[in-house]
Amino acid sequence: MAMQPSDLRFVVADRYVYKIANSLNEPDLGFRFLKTKYDEEKDPIGDMLVDYPEFVQFIDFFTVNWDKVKPISITEIPDLAKDTDKRRALFGALPASLAYNKFGIPVKEETVRMIQDWGESHIDMTFTLMKCPVAKLYPDVNPSALVIPFVYAVKVACPSTGSIYYIQLPTDAPFIKDPDPVSAIAWTVYTRVDYSQIKAVVRQGDIINIVTTVGQNSKEVLKFVEPYHFTRGQYLEKVIFQS
């Protein structure tokens, strides 16, 4: 028997399973999770199908229903996941903007001039360090049981595309204690390539591509070191934004 949309599943953290469609092949909760996860992308259905190639045969089902389905709101998650581990998994599977658009508090904002399109132009990029009260994400949990008061993210606003996205950050990093939005976005570049062999870091949204000085036919050998995060200075020196 051929597969139906009702056979599709959205799985979170390898253990929480949600149906994409009900027995009547109508969108179910799993579809809403997909809509929430990808709706901010330029090509939401296309990007979703890249991550879930097994859904490609049902592209008509997703196309017909995508605009009809309502995304999950942050206030619904406590009812969908009473268990704190399950709720944490859902927050991890959905875009950070879900929480920060609703409860986010700006900590510090900084605008810096960055190289764009391999030096053909420059662009003023604004980075904002944001915090979100954990108590807002777990309103039904006793505050004394919450280990940390806030979670953090860096908000990136690109004036050329109008896109805004958030990247989660560690809560104990130096750039959190001494707020520094540029150091925060720099931390998101993580590599093993020796810095001396990095020609540029090309960034398009949250997609990062390391370009090295070692050519395909070069006799030079690419050096790898212990994994490290970029510093503020390294980020400003090497990163090129691709429009």
Image (spheres, grey):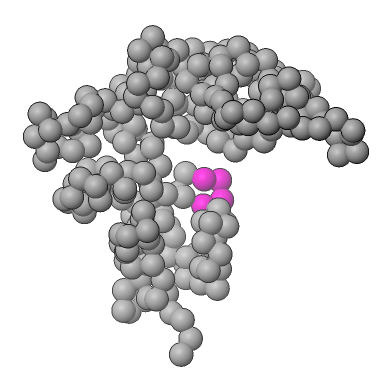
User: Could you tell me how many numbered marks the image carries?
Assistant: 0
Q: Is residue 146 left or right of residue 217?
A: left
Which quadrant of the figure has residue 100? Answer: top left
Q: Position of residue 105 (x, y in %)?
A: 30, 22
Q: Position of residue 82 (x, y in %)?
A: 16, 50
Magenta region, main secondary structure = loop
The part of the chain drawn in magenta is 41-45
Res. 33 in view? no
Of residues 100 and 212, the one nearer the viewer is 212
Answer whether residue 200 is magenta in the image.
no
Residue at 42% over, 15% down: 175
Q: Position of residue 119 (x, y in %)?
A: 77, 20
Residue at 41% over, 71% down: 8
Residue at 37% over, 76% down: 6
Up the image or down, 231 lies above or below 85; here it is above
Q: Is residue 223 left or right of residue 24?
A: right
Up the image or down, 172 lies above or below 220; here it is above
Of residues 111 and 201, the one nearer the viewer is 201
Answer whether residue 44 is magenta in the image.
yes
Q: Is residue 14 left or right of residue 42?
A: left
